[in-house]
Image: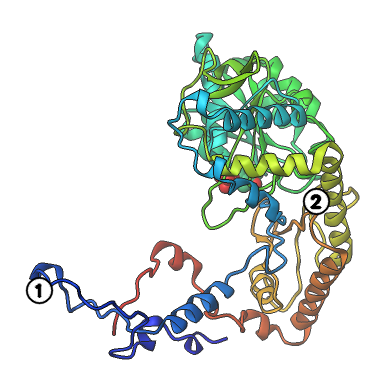
Amino acid sequence: MKHTETPLLYEMSVPGRTGTILPKLDVPETALPKDLVRDDLGLPELDELSVVRHFTRLSQKNFSVDGQFYPLGSCTMKYNPKMNEDAAALPGFRRTHPLLPETMVQGAAGLLFKLQEALKEIMGYEAFTLQPAAGAQGELTGVLMIRAYHQKKGDTKRVRMLIPDSAHGTNPATCTMAGFVAETIPSNASGAVDMDALKAACEGEKAETVAGLMITNPSTLGLFEPNIREIIDLVHKAGGLVYGDGANMNALMGIVKPGQLGFDVMHLNLHKTFSTPHGGGGPGSGAVGAGPALKDFLPGPVAQREGGRYSFMHPRESIGRMKTFNGNFSVLVKTYAYIRTLGKEGIRRAAEYAVLNANYLKELVKENYPVAYGQCRPCMHEFVASPDLGNGVNTVDIAKRLIDYGFHPPTVYFPLIVKEAFMAEPTETETPETLEAFAAALKAIAEEARTNPEILKSAPHHTPVRRLDETAAARKPVLRYKQQ
Ligand SMILES: *Cc1c(COP(=O)(O)O)cnc(C)c1O
């Protein structure tokens, strides 16, 4: 539908039309105070049905997991079961005030405690905080804990944080915010951490300045890091600690426990892996788990159980609060409902299907959309292709054209180390038929690149607004309707 076919509320206005009938006055009529009345607002005058249709139409223009396939890589746009919403909306949870005394919130505190226990079990950690509101805030929490650990030992020379070049952009940003110096470790030809570069960065004289390593596994290439044990050992030997970016645990949950692999601290994106809805800015949760070296530095309050009663405590060396009260509580209720619905077997099966779906899709499209790294290895929950369809067609053109075919585009141009990166994450909740339909669209687009590249260059064609200048849209957003 063209933009012009969807009139704005203001343009539909008819003078005198209204959606309400006010009751007859039962008090004497007086004029409103002059300074409260403005004639220059030009508010639209409309009937109720027109307003309802207008907003319903607008809502249907949104992409959503409930409406369309949404293979946005590194974002885990899986289906969010409605039962979780029902649980979060139970009056006992929804109407609980965060300042109520512990004795009156035993149910809510018990849920937080049980969620911490479940996450400890799934991830192999000794303790968890549910405070951080997002993945990036979870990262900051973990890295501040590493800083507090070194400071407590008087180890102030440790300022270098090693970060592989395939890392999410938030990793170097977080480490810089926490006062460390980000140092890039290159990837090798197979997309894994270059072990020689890592050794050079943390052996000999350089060892004593290593604060730690921030690493994502599976990497943002969707590949399991084959040398992860050796990498962790090298950093530990230098006296550093290892931060795991666990935003994308969808391939590992129920199968591998990162705590047992040796990651000292790791955040989870409950709004990705554990199915709570996200996009459009939240709310989310970046729960953080810690092993023996760091568990005493976790932010409080942490829920605990003593003699059958639940209460909150603040760990001994806590870095302090990261968020008010107990984090985004409704997200935590949904996470708990999700984990309890799936159970131990279901969590593992979800991860297995996530990997199976990604590999199935990778195989379906590899002729025109081959992966740049790890051709001979199975991918994890996602894969990163490097398409070259010819005739000057770029990944951005493919992404825009996919919208015309009714699909949300994958993540594009990330990670930076892949040329024309096209990062697709189908998740476990999609059927084979959906993956096949998506692959068929990609095949049709490859054909269009040969026969009619212009249609790709000028896509999308069926959206309310056509191709946007995304930089200008972000830097100079037009957020307000201006009357002509
Ligand atoms: C999504 C993501 C993050 C950031 O999470 P937010 O909740 O958006 O702050 C960090 N690292 C990786 C690998 C991610 O995929």
Q: Residue at x 74, y 38 (%)?
A: 217
The residue where tag 2 is placed is 373
Q: Position of residue 223 (x, y in %)?
A: 80, 45
Q: Residue at x 71, y 46 (%)?
A: 220
**458 over 234 or under it: above or below:** below
Cα–Cα span, label 2 and label 1: 76 Å
* Left or right placement of residue 321 versus residue 375 in this view: left
Query: 331 or 287, which is in the foreground?
Result: 331
The residue where tag 1 is placed is 30
Q: Secondary structure at mark 1?
A: loop
**39 over 238 or under it: above or below:** below
Q: Quadrant of the C terminus?
A: bottom left
Query: From where the camera sits, is residue 80 visible?
Result: no
* Left or right placement of residue 30 versus residue 245 in this view: left
Query: 253 or 328, which is in the foreground?
Result: 328
Q: Amino acid at mark 2?
A: Tyr
> Which label is found at residue 363?
none
Q: Position of residue 17 (x, y in %)?
A: 33, 88
Q: Earlier in the sequence, mark 2 or mark 1?
A: 1
Q: Farthest residue to the top: give it.
A: 153
Q: Residue at x 77, y 44 (%)?
A: 341
Q: Are marks 2 and 1 in contact (CB under 8 Å)?
A: no
Classify residue 131 by image quadrant: top right
Q: Position of residue 333 (x, y in %)?
A: 62, 41
Q: Amino acid at mark 1?
A: Thr
